[in-house]
Amino acid sequence: MTVVPIRKVGDPVLRQVAAPVIDFDAELDRLVQDLTETLTRSGGAGLAAPQIGVGLRVFAISPELPGNDLRLDHLVNPVLEFPDEAEQSGPEGCLSIPGIYLDTRRRTNVLAKGYTKKGDPVQVVGDGILSRCMQHETDHLDGILFIDRQDEAGRQRLLDTLREASWFDGLPRPEVRVSPH
């Protein structure tokens, strides 16, 4: 296992749609281990493969998230379904945009289907923070950042704040998109 540097906003890999995993092999096992170790060291709630520069549809989440009864720590090729229209709004941050937290609207309940690193099918029903985390990480796999879910004023405030962040120096100006969700 290796702790891998986390890519920051402005890195083009964060805006690319990740490819589905086809081979459930030792390379995938190592990727999941690297994601899990990097996430554990970072103290975050979730980490997607593009955040460490790998364009595959895999993410790791913290098994300590409330509502994670399966103790799931990763999901491969996730597909999200929403059983109802209920929404939640609350603070959200991102390891690729350190130190920035914004109220972000998400669906309250989610059904996530995917696979383990061994190719076994898995299904997770989540609400609250677990739902938020799975939506956030799946967005990463689709090239979407949580800043894309902000209104125009929120996006502008964030861009202004990013320009002043010490870690941002030298990175290309981040692209902000309007989320399709």
Image: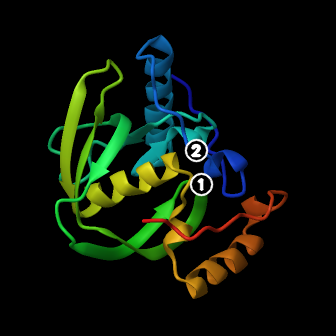
Q: Secondary structure at mark 1?
A: loop
Among the 4 quarters of the image, the one containing residue 158: bottom right
Q: Amino acid at mark 1?
A: Ser
User: 149 above or below 52?
Assistant: below
Mark 1 = which residue? 96
Residue beneath the point at 51% across and 50% down: 142
Q: Amino acid at mark 2?
A: Gln
Neighbor class of circle 2 (other Cα within 10 Å; few <14, some 14-19, many 20+) is many
Q: Is residue 125 above or below residue 77?
A: below
Q: Residue 54 appears at what percent x and percent y?
A: 59, 33
Residue 64 pos. (x, y %): 26, 46
Q: Give the residue furthest to the top.
A: 26
How far is the residue under mark 2 from the one under mark 1? 7 Å
Name the spot of residue 148 as percent of width and height, x first.
55, 69
- Closest to the observer, 14 or 39: 14
Residue 20 left/right relative to 81: right
Q: Is residue 115 left or right of residue 109?
A: right
Q: Earlier in the sequence, mark 2 or mark 1?
A: 2
Q: Which quadrant of the structure image shows residue 62?
A: top left
Residue for point 34% across, 36% down? 75
Which residue corresponds to mark 2? Answer: 51
Indicate the secondary structure of the residue bearing disc 2.
Answer: helix
Say whether marks 2 and 1 touch (CB < 8 Å). Answer: yes
The answer to which of 52 and 122 lies nearer the viewer is: 122
Compare residues 131 and 4 and report the one nearer the observer: 131
Regarding residue 56, the answer to whether it shows in the image is yes
Image position, residue 39 (x, y; %)? 46, 41
Left or right placement of residue 76 versus residue 101 in this view? left
Q: What number of labels is visible?
A: 2
Disc 1 crowd rating (10 Å Cα; few below 14, some 14-19, many 20+) is some
Q: Is residue 75 above or below residue 110?
A: above
Left or right: where does residue 166 sit relative to residue 15?
right
